[in-house]
Image (spheres, helix red, strand yellow):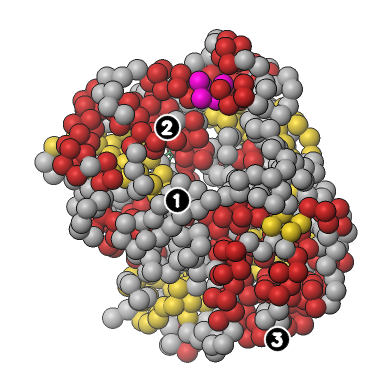
Amino acid sequence: MRRVLRTCPLCEATCGLALTLDGDDVVRVEGDPDDPLSRGFLCPKGATIGALHADPDRLRAPLVRRGDALVECTWDEAFAAVAEGLERVVAAHGKESVGVYLGNPNVHTLAGPFYVPAFVRALGTGHVFSASTVDQMPQHLASGLMFGHPDRIPVPDLDRTDWLLMLGANPVESNGSLCTAPDFPGRLKALRARGGRLIVVDPRRTRTADLADEHLAIRPGTDALLLWAMVQVLFAEDRVDLRDLAPHVEGVEALRDLAAPFTPETVAGHCRVPAEVIRELARGLAAAERGCVYARIGAHTTAFGTLAAWAVGALNVLTGNLDRPGGSMFPRSALGRPHPGGRGRGFAVGRWRSRVSGRPEVRGEVPSAVLAEEMSTPGPGQLRALFTIAGNPARSLPDSAGLERALGGLDLLVCVDPYLNETTRLADVVLPPPGPLARAHYDVAFGNLMVRNVARYTPPTLAADGPDECDIVARLTLIASGAGAQGDPAWVTMGVLGHLAKGAAAAGAASEAELLAASAGESGPEAILDLLLRTGPYPGLSLDALRAAPSGVDLGPLQPCVPDVLSTPSGRIELAPASIVDDVPRLAALLDDAPVEGLLLVGRRHLRSNNSWGHNVPRMAGGTNRCTLQMHPDDAAARGLRDGDVVAIASRVGRVEAPLEVTDRIAAGVVSLPHGWGHDAPGARLRVAAKAPGVNSNLLTDGAVTDPLSGNAGLNGIPVEVAASV
Ligand SMILES: Nc1nc2c(c(=O)[nH]1)N[C@H]1C(S)=C(S)[C@@H](COP(=O)(O)OP(=O)(O)OC[C@H]3O[C@@H](n4cnc5c(=O)[nH]c(N)nc54)[C@H](O)[C@@H]3O)O[C@H]1N2
Ligand SMILES: Nc1nc2c(c(=O)[nH]1)N[C@H]1C(S)=C(S)[C@@H](COP(=O)(O)OP(=O)(O)OC[C@H]3O[C@@H](n4cnc5c(=O)[nH]c(N)nc54)[C@H](O)[C@@H]3O)O[C@H]1N2
Ligand code: SF4
Ligand SMILES: [Mo]
């Protein structure tokens, strides 16, 4: 028996786990009490990490298509098939006919941040898509425009705030997003225990809402209206107080004018939140010594996602709560680069546009909502080959009937994925990375989102049954850059290291040669990590320093960093840049129309789910984690429907059937179906998940509904009709 510590890679909370192993078998999973961030917390999902690694359906060898069948092959055969297929497509149709879709687990691997960017560059295509545009792109855009960099995302300083307004997030089930806070529920309880106030805005009375002082069941899709009305109240009642931020803010008066139309009275009917309640929210935030507004995907995945994210940032700034302990603060990753301080180039978008509907690039990608049309619309530049890395677009993207058809019609589909699932069953080549226990781990992305700065490194626990994902992506990079199927992944690592050392040397860290020599004892992703740690903002950190502290190194509470963190053209926090000014009239136009009537569909997450791939572990299936349509009793009665009935749900783009769950925990006029289900696709091998397949909610979501600025899909607030199934 041995005990090992590992950071859990299954959600953004990044809990420290203590595993007990008997040989290669995980016999017990506990929270690591010494982890400086998670302090012993784990959720039921983290407890399945051993079962996930041992899942007999997890692929241990690559697959290649022979006629109608996907058959096991050697790694050399698999890479040769990729090289041959890619060469064929590029020769016939050019580089622009090749695309890549990057799924969510890329933010939980080392391959995602360290190797995937080089692969994308080597492909040399504008056809870059990711899960970001069905998720948080509005926040990236808002951060880019407001602070100068899309990844400077302030988080609620959860452990010190005493007034928190949370919209469109359910961290008691999701464990939090764009806010890395293990034991989010415990942290919310502590907020209330120290006399703080929690207000939750959600059309469903969630388990998070159960913890709150106040729950507001907003009409889906109207958070931007409510938030802009709060901004209006701050100005109208003369409650704006920038506090320490005053010298660092640009555009306050322009914002006042922009917010003027959004009085609480004009938005109340749309939001179904009384005007006086909205006023009290603004007053509460203004009066709080340490207050914060935080919004997540319920507010981001709508047609007004960027304006909602914008107003959240603006409210925190206007009340002087940004960059202030107990407010909304910027984490400082151990891998962070020096803050520029002063004027920067700002954040450019629209460097290219999508071919068919001309959607602007944002942060190096175009919207996933247009992936289907890029594949299915003929003409020069039509997408004919696609690489997916850690994604399941057939279940996670809107309007997925058309998308799945288009995936099936590609000339080449290559998937880096451990499962034969709804997407990879359509592949020509499947390249499975080793299981979650047979790899090194470091939270590159989440270091930028932690409510307390920590650094933790996990070495591989078990031997891998194939090449590491970093090596897989490196070999794909060599293929895409013309070096062939036999290249050495170390060449790619050397390229990445050289690039990083050059940047760090230019910033004055040391000479390039000295930096490379210091990390010379490491290889692969560890070498990259070591170099980043040595050149990061915390002196004395290195990979060896982290090895010596397996529970993690505590780097302390969040610290103020304005103005150094800013890199906008003005060198200040920008509250009214042109693209926001130009988009506000679209939101104001809603006020001219009558409030939307009829049923609106929203999603939900269950504690024991993980987007589309959590359902194949027996302990994650069943219980309350069911694919049902939740509906308010009044709406059910009006349609003559009863709990347990199978109902037909129809939207503009599709129709599915699901069992009805009648519950007063959802607002009247709203129905909810979770995403990530529909595990009955022929050719997939998800034997546990297939026993309770559920239905794919993205057959209903409408790819035509997007936030025009960020390109993010509007997955919540979809008009639907529900009737008894006939
Ligand atoms: N209707 C609706 N749709 C949604 C959402 C919603 O709320 N409602 N949520 C959206 C959000 S927030 C997101 S992030 C997206 C997610 O969208 P995707 O990322 O496309 O989908 P996932 O279900 O996360 O699928 C992850 C894939 O990665 C594979 N995988 C797991 N671990 C690894 C690994 O270590 N390496 C590799 N290479 N592969 C791995 C899994 O087998 C699976 O195929 O879905 C979005 N879709
Ligand atoms: N257990 C579990 N945990 C997960 C995941 C999972 O699939 N399962 N997925 C992970 C991923 S990829 C992400 S991005 C995060 C997401 O984490 P969260 O942002 O916390 O997402 P959800 O839990 O879906 O909560 C969104 C809430 O928004 C509400 N909502 C829907 N529409 C609206 C609206 O218009 N306005 C408002 N105010 N609320 C609305 C929904 O009812 C729901 O309760 O979770 C991560 N963690
Ligand atoms: S909360 Fe997230 S990181 Fe923590 S144990 Fe659960 S799945 Fe893992
Ligand atoms: Mo996500």
Mark 1: amino acid: Arg
Could you say which is closer to the camera, residue 377 or residue 570? 570
- Circle on res. 265: 3
The residue lying furthest to the left in this view is 67
- Seen in the picture, residue 264 relative to 395 is either above or below; the reply is below
**Which residue is tagged 2?**
118
Lateral position of residue 273 relative to residue 717, left or right: right
Q: Tag 3, which secondary structure?
A: helix
Q: Is residue 679 magenta?
A: no
Mark 3: amino acid: Glu
CB atoms of marks 1 and 3 within 8 Å = no
Q: Residue 14 in the image: x percent, y percent?
A: 61, 39
Q: Is residue 24 visible?
A: no
The first of marks 1 and 3 along the sequence is: 3
Give the residues drawn in magenta, as a range: 497-501
- Circle on res. 351: 1
Q: Tag 1, which secondary structure?
A: loop
- Using a 10 Å C-alpha cutoff, classify the residue at mark 1 as few (fewer than 14 neighbours), some (14 to 19) or many (20 or more): few
Q: Give me the C-alpha separation between circle 2 and circle 1.
A: 19 Å
Mark 2: amino acid: Ala
Examine the image and state in which quarter residue 700 appears.
Answer: bottom left
- Seen in the picture, residue 77 relative to 420 is either above or below; the reply is above
Q: Is residue 498 magenta?
A: yes
Q: Residue 610 in the image: x percent, y percent?
A: 48, 49
> Which quadrant of the rendered structure holds the C terminus?
bottom left
- Using a 10 Å C-alpha cutoff, classify the residue at mark 2 as few (fewer than 14 neighbours), some (14 to 19) or many (20 or more): many
The first of marks 2 and 1 along the sequence is: 2
The residue at 65%/50% (across/down) is 569
